[in-house]
């Protein structure tokens, strides 16, 4: 299989706001601007959360449709991966709306996690089963979002039981969330060693962990997620002007470390998206 590096740009997120970085996109025009900046620099997957124009996170199907169509016009072959995580406190019904649009991929959050303070990001086993089944009905490739090691085991168990239909699971190790696994080399090695060899994986380091985790991932043969959802700084004390700037830094790191970047077509092949 190709050794090329897939870059996923998580351009917006539900927790990050314009107060953190004024370039965080709310309107459709801003979403397209940020998606295109990342795509132009080498991102092949756009992980997408959407908002109302005044910045409120929403999982509204029409809003997703509008944003996805506009992104596809600007970045024709990009893989747009809607979030089914939405924001903390949303119902399953609300969160699942973008799956009705039959996207190629969507996230499947594989466990409940503390999200700092009193926030709990809830994903019970039955919820995960419901989400997995709906994705299978719509032929959507799940990206298993795992915030801790037990969530890897949950995904593998539900795959074995036939609820997650995908044969070659793709994981995203989200590391450094306040309540999840730490973003250390030790824990990344532990996560990678916990998945079967037919699986693929991406890693995302939150906040100051973003580029160290990207560097480890490039060397270890995984794939990188980068973007405002996880980190708004280009370097210490310097806000990124766009998601594209963050992607460009990962591309530069990959070049230095000897990994070529996967095109959208190559990304579909590596992830076996049918
Ligand atoms: N915003 C978090 C509560 C996902 O996109 O699937 C959930 C999240 C995960 O961002
Ligand atoms: Zn997300």
Image (cartoon, rainbow, N blue to C red):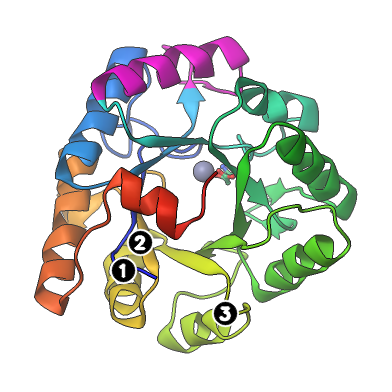
**First of labels 1, 3 by sequence position:** 3
Judging depth in this view, the residue of 95 and 180 nearest the camera is 95
Alpha carbon of mark 1 to alpha carbon of mark 3: how far? Answer: 20 Å
Check contact, mark 1 vs mark 2: CB within 8 A. Answer: yes
Alpha carbon of mark 1 to alpha carbon of mark 2: how far? Answer: 6 Å
Q: Which quarter holds ligand 1? A: top right
| Residue sitting farthest toward the bottom | 186
Give the quarter of the image for residue 85: top right
Quarter of the image for the N terminus: give it.
Answer: bottom left
Q: Secondary structure at mark 3?
A: loop
Position of residue 20 measured from the top left corner of the image (x, y, whole percent): 32, 39
**First of labels 1, 2 by sequence position:** 1
Position of residue 236 measured from the top left corner of the image (x, y, whole percent): 18, 62
Q: Measured along the vertical axis of the image, is residue 98 above or below residue 192?
A: above
53 in the magenta segment: yes
Judging depth in this view, the residue of 107 and 273 nearest the camera is 273
**First of labels 2, 3 by sequence position:** 3
Q: Secondary structure at mark 2?
A: strand
Give me the residue at 77% from left, 49% from top. Answer: 123
Q: Which mark is residue 224?
A: 2
68 in the magenta segment: yes
Magenta highlight range: 51-74
Give me the residue at 16% from left, 59% from top. Answer: 251
Counting the numbered discs, the total is 3
Q: Secondary structure at mark 1?
A: helix
């Amino acid at each position: 299989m190709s050794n090329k590096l897939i870059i996923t740009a998580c351009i917006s997120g539900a927790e990050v706001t314009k107060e953190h970085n004024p370039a965080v996109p709310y309107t459709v025009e801003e979403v397209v601007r940020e998606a295109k900046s990342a795509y132009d620099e080498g991102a092949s997957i756009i992980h997408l959360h959407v908002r109302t124009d005044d910045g409120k996170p929403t999982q509204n199907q029409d809003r997703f449709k509008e944003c996805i169509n506009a992104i596809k016009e600007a970045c024709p072959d990009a893989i747009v991966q809607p979030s089914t995580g939405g924001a903390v406190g949303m119902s399953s019904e609300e969160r699942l709306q973008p799956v009705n649009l039959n996207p190629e991929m969507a996230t499947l959050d594989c466990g409940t996690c503390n999200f700092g303070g009193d926030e709990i990001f809830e994903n019970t086993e039955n919820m995960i089963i419901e989400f997995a089944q709906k994705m299978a009905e719509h032929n959507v490739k799940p990206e298993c979002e795992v915030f801790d090691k037990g969530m890897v085991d949950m995904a593998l168990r539900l795959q074995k039981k036939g609820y997650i239909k995908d044969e070659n699971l793709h994981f995203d190790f989200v590391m450094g969330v306040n309540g999840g696994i730490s973003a250390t080399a030790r824990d990344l090695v532990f996560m990678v060693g916990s998945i079967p060899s037919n699986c693929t994986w991406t890693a995302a380091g939150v906040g100051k962990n973003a580029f160290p985790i990207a560097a480890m991932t490039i060397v270890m043969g995984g794939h990188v997620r980068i973007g405002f959802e996880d980190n708004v700084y280009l370097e210490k004390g310097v806000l990124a002007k766009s998601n594209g700037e963050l992607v460009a830094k990962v591309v530069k790191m990959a070049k230095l470390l000897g990994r070529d970047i996967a095109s959208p077509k190559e990304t579909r092949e590596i992830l076996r998206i049918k």
